[in-house]
Amino acid sequence: MNVRLYLWQRGTAAIMVPMILVHLAVIFYAMDRPLTAEQILSRTQGSFAWGLFYGMFVLLASIHASIGIRNVLSEWGKLKSGTAAGVSTVFGAALIVLGLRAVAAVVLPAGMLP
Amino acid sequence: MSATWRAYRRNILWNAALIHRLSGIGLAVFLPLHFLVLGLAIEGAGKLDGLLTLAQMPGVKLAEAGLIFLLVVHFLGGLRLLAIENLRWFGGQKWIAISLAVVSGSIAFFFLIHVL
Amino acid sequence: MSDTVSEIKVSLWRGGSDGRFQTYTVPLQKNQMVLDIITWVQRHRAPTLSYRFACRVGMCGSCAMTVNGRPRWTCRTHVAKVVRDGKIEIAPLANLPIIKDLAVDMVPFFEKGVAAHGTFAASKTRADVIEPIKPSEPARRTADEAIECINCGVCYAACDSVRWNPDYLGPAALNRAWSLANDVRDSDGPGRLVAISAAGGCHNCHTLHSCHEHCPMGLNPTRSIAGLKRLSAQAFVLGKISL
């Protein structure tokens, strides 16, 4: 861990603070009704705002989580620093791909889905 | 393992740091699964619904409450760390750490009894 | 006159890293320190026992060992306070190579102190006018809060970030770096910033607080390291450090 990785991790954390509060609000709003695809999609499909919000959230969380996992892999997993960096980068990239795909899945209007 | 193994770890703030790390790992493991489930909507609402009906099971609701605990405790613990690292040193950190853990547990418990 | 109250079983680490605990039965007297017990064992039971001490009055830090799982000064630890079920377990300090029995090699610890640029670099010579610095000045107060470290190694032994990352400079080295970073006379600020910002530097601290919890001098390396993180982040963002 050096100052560059530290700033990326703490920086993404700081920006995510208000986003986590929004996400928790969404969760608690949703818990009052049965969770169905229609409930979710009727609010998110076609929404540029949700797309932007959750798209950013995915990027920030992926960076934050991958740096954290890098520390865990080298400190607890005993991986060498290069290996830990490689594995955590792959993990972060996977999160970005899966995450943006999920955002697209719930935000893109029905007609635009493949 | 003797009664005094790693006795130097037996204090509140060390355990607060451990909870922070463990909750981070838990969330990191959960996140890809979360994305995969939501991504099912690409195949149409039906596929997603198929999985969401599982969310009616009490075991799943318990797991959801656990995840909410992980999220909130990691978030609040992270705020405590950001405060330590960016503000002037403040006392009462053991009390703050305990309170944050209690708040996290309460929020998760509130969620659980609400959805069960 | 000494009152022999009872006996206790004292387990001492014998050998190197592949050694084992050996248990001795020791007469327990009133007001004994753990160091007294170790010395009794060496004099009466185990003449080949290796251990370190010097001042035996809580000033030098030489007698630091792991007592019942916690790193502490054995000359300042009352036996009565740590004995559990009539037993005490004493091991060498953690996170450092064992030379023999209860003595560890402190060289890696001191080397990290140097690697963190934990030495004062003068900016003036004896020919210059002495710079007046009031003890009440904020930077001096901050430096003085961290300056009483005697390099006993207890914080280093208590730190799991050190245990999990052998490259981590550790709480003592970084605490010293923070003290010097606040010394207005010091001229090695830039070099020190790079040293504590690189891999192995202050950012490996996970705020476990073990250093703060165990320091026999009551110092707070957690606070010092948080200060270094702020300094380092600021300098990096302003382009003053290149890694």
Image: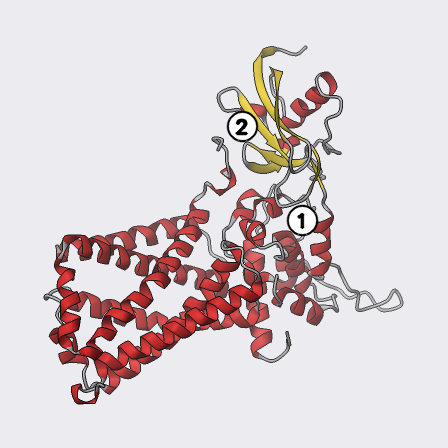
- Mark 2, secondary structure of its residue: helix
Position of B10 relative to A101 (above/below) = above
The residue under the point 64% across, 76% down is: C242
Q: Quadrant of the N terminus of chain C?
A: top right
Q: Are marks 2 and 1 in contact (CB under 8 Å)?
A: no
Q: Position of residue C65 (x, y in %)?
A: 64, 36
In the displayed structure, does residue C112 sit left or right of residue B50? right
Q: Amino acid at mark 2?
A: Val
Q: Secondary structure at mark 1?
A: loop
Q: CA distance from mark 2 to mark 1?
A: 26 Å
Q: Which residue is mark 1?
A: C148
Residue A20 vs residue A81, the one in the foreground: A81
Q: Residue at x 75, y 64 (%)?
A: C132
* Residue in the picture at 88% in, 64% down: C126
Residue B75 visible within the image: no
Q: Where is mark 2, residue-wise?
A: C82
In the rendered view, does C84 fall on the left or right side of C196?
A: left
Vertical order, C214 against A41 (above or below): above
Q: Is residue A91 above or below residue C39?
A: below
